[in-house]
Amino acid sequence: MIPALILGAGLFQAGSTIYGAKKASTEAKYNAKIKEQQARMIGSQMGIESGQWDRAMGRASSSLYAKVGKSGITMSGSPMAALLDMETQMEMDKSISLYNLEWQKRGVQSEADAYRRQSKSVMQQGYVNAFSSLLSTGANYWGK
């Protein structure tokens, strides 16, 4: 009777270990999918923001052209320098904004990759622990 209990308890413990590992692995995979979705959303945000910057630059340029034209002077000299300075500054701001979003996207993707690695690691550790439990059970069973 006692040896059967030892075997049953050992098998139950090994099975519980593998079940727990599978649950943790499934959760890690789910978290990875969420992070990958967030990374895709940031990528979409980059495209939208780029378009918004382009429209803002177009509006600002058009406004400057209209003001210069209204004043009766030509787009050369100081007005042209002002236009170039404005467009350069706006392009730099756009680049900084997109750079920050790219790094944010990479960080989130890196988290997704870490969850995928965690999923594999948890499963491997679960199998190792289950095997160890079975070895320990065998030693207790045959040692008696």
Image (cartoon, rainbow, N blue to C red):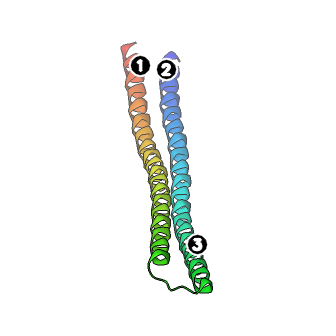
Tags 1 and 3 touching, CB below 8 Å: no
Query: Is 137 rendered above or below residue 31?
Result: above
Name the residue at 54% across, 73% down: 57
Please state the total of marks drawn on the protein image.
Answer: 3
Along the viewing direction, whichever of 33 and 9 lies nearer the viewer: 33
Q: Amino acid at mark 1?
A: Tyr
Query: Is 34 rendered above or below residue 80?
Result: above
Q: Secondary structure at mark 3?
A: helix
Label ID, residue 43: none
Where residue 79 sits in the image (x, y, percent)? Answer: 50, 77
Tags 2 and 1 touching, CB below 8 Å: yes
The mark lying in front, picked from 3 and 2, is 3
Q: Secondary structure at mark 1?
A: helix
The mark lying in front, picked from 1 and 3, is 3
Marks 1 and 3, how far apart at CA: 77 Å
Tags 3 and 2 touching, CB below 8 Å: no
Tag 3 or tag 1, which sits nearer the N-term? 3
Residue topped by disc 3: 56
Marks 3 and 2, how far apart at CA: 74 Å
Residue topped by disc 1: 141
Q: Residues within 10 Å of mark 1 (few under 14, many from 20)?
A: some
Tag 1 or tag 2, which sits nearer the N-term? 2
Name the residue at 50% across, 86% down: 74
Residue topped by disc 2: 6
Q: Amino acid at mark 3?
A: Ala
Along the viewing direction, whichever of 137 and 16 lies nearer the viewer: 16
Q: Residues within 10 Å of mark 3 (few under 14, many from 20)?
A: few
